[in-house]
Amino acid sequence: MSDSEIMLSPWQTGFRGRCPRCGEGRLYKSFLNVTDQCAVCDLDLSKEDAGDGAVPFIVFLVGAVCSGFGVWLHLVVGAPIWVAALLLTLLCIILVLILLPKTKGLLIALQYVNRAGDTGQNTFED
Ligand SMILES: [Zn+2]
């Protein structure tokens, strides 16, 4: 890629599950499996993986939201403990399933924009 090429925002590409270079092709071939190659711009994504990098962000965000929701349920609503446990479990599962692919895509797009791979070099093949 030439330096004069315009980089798309990682929020517009990876967060939406799109290719970090063109913003059109799908980033995933299944729920969290990164596709081997972009179907639109042929960017090689086979070596790209954010690993467990998205997990700490998800843990902190979902933990904060669910903790606040749990306190609200107990102190304001006065819900029984089994209702609170059930609702918090469901809320945590739903939030993780929604946020995990978006956060992983965001990290992959940030790696692409900043040319940072596991080896310290851009692992994307141009
Ligand atoms: Zn692409």
Image (tube, helix red, strand yellow):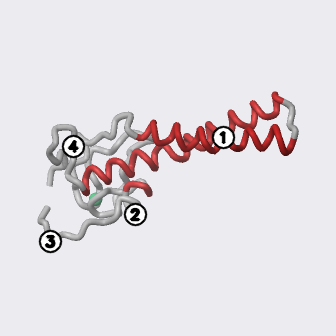
Residue position for label 1:
66
Cα–Cα gap, marks 2 and 4: 20 Å
Residue 126 image point, x, y percent: 14, 55
Amino acid type, mark 4: Gly
Residue 83 is drawn in which quadrant?
top right
Left of 30 or right of it: where is 115? left
Determine whether 50 is above or below 16 in the image. Answer: above
Marker count (numbered)? 4
Cα–Cα gap, marks 4 and 3: 21 Å
Image quarter where the N terminus lies is: bottom left
Residue 22 is drawn in which quadrant?
bottom left
Q: Is mark 2 within 8 Å of ligand 1?
A: no
Question: Quick one: label 3 or label 2, which is nearer the N terminus?
Answer: 3
Q: How crowded is mark 1: few (under 14 residues within 10 Å), some or many (20 or more)?
A: some
Question: Quick one: label 2 or label 4, which is nearer the N terminus?
Answer: 2
In the rendered image, the residue lying farthest to the front is: 75
Residue position for label 2:
12
Cα–Cα gap, marks 2 and 1: 27 Å
Closest to the camera, between mark 2 and mark 1, is 1
